[in-house]
Amino acid sequence: MHCPFCRHTDSKVIDSRTTEDGTAIRRRRACPECGRRFTTIETATLLVVKRSGVTEPFSRDKVVAGVRKACQGRPVTEDQLALLAQRVEEAVRASGVAELPTHEVGLAILGPLRELDLVAYLRFASVYRAFESLEDFEQAIAELRGAEADAEAAAEAALRPHGEQDEDAGVEPGAQPVTAP
């Protein structure tokens, strides 16, 4: 690291700490030539490869801007959008790759957006997954309803006393339950 004061080509690291959000490292350095101290902040660059082949740095602001359009008129706050963007960035960074296509960023957005607002999810998914007909919407809505029914069934099962089962539990499909005379 060059000294910003005397341009000496070397410096000594005195202290290293991670930033509060853990996305960067703050290093306190000293120049052996002039003795002055300075701070550097190091971040891992995450690049997004667009369909045109152009690469650009990942931007939470772009994620928020895209999702904000889908959330227009919905009860979603700016804080919720910022948290969603943070979750998306954490997810794409966790993939461990330095460059990822915009398609992967879109996939990372769909999950948290689905949890945030189903209508906004459908709006975003309709553009992202290029819905071309009403059948595409119907299929997506059916998937959402199926997932919602599964979640409700799991919640009901969790509320039952331990060991209690449905009346028809353990009966094979199509078989008649046996009743004692």
Image (cartoon, rainbow, N blue to C red):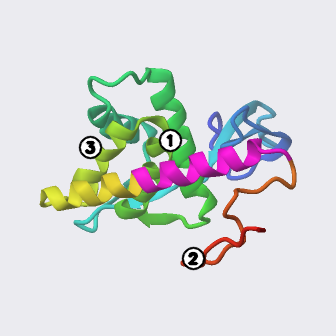
The residue labelled by disc 3 is 123
Residue 49 shown left or right of residue 99 in the figure:
left
Q: Which residues are magenta?
A: 145-161
Residue type, mark 1 in image = Glu
Residue type, mark 2 in image = Pro
Displayed quadrant of residue 5: top right
Q: CA distance from mark 2 to mark 1?
A: 33 Å
Residue 68 sits above or below residue 123 on the image: above
| Label 1 environment density (alpha carbons within 10 Å; few <14, some 14–19, many ≥20) | few
Residue 15 sits above or below residue 129 on the image: above
Q: Residue at x 23, y 54 (%)?
A: 137
Near-viewer residue (138 or 56):
138
Q: CA distance from mark 1 to mark 3?
A: 14 Å
Kindly state the secondary structure of the residue where label 3 is placed.
helix
Question: Do the residues under discs 1 and 3 have CB atoms within 8 angstroms?
Answer: no
Residue type, mark 3 in image = Arg
Q: Residue 62, image x and y in percent? A: 36, 40
The residue labelled by disc 2 is 173
Mark 2 or 3, closer to the camera: 2
Q: Residue at x 78, y 42 (%)?
A: 33
Whether 70 is among the magenta residues is no
Kindly state the secondary structure of the residue where label 1 is placed.
helix
Residue 173 visible in the snapshot = yes
Question: Do the residues under discs 2 and 3 have CB atoms within 8 angstroms?
Answer: no
Question: Do the residues under discs 2 and 1 have CB atoms within 8 angstroms?
Answer: no
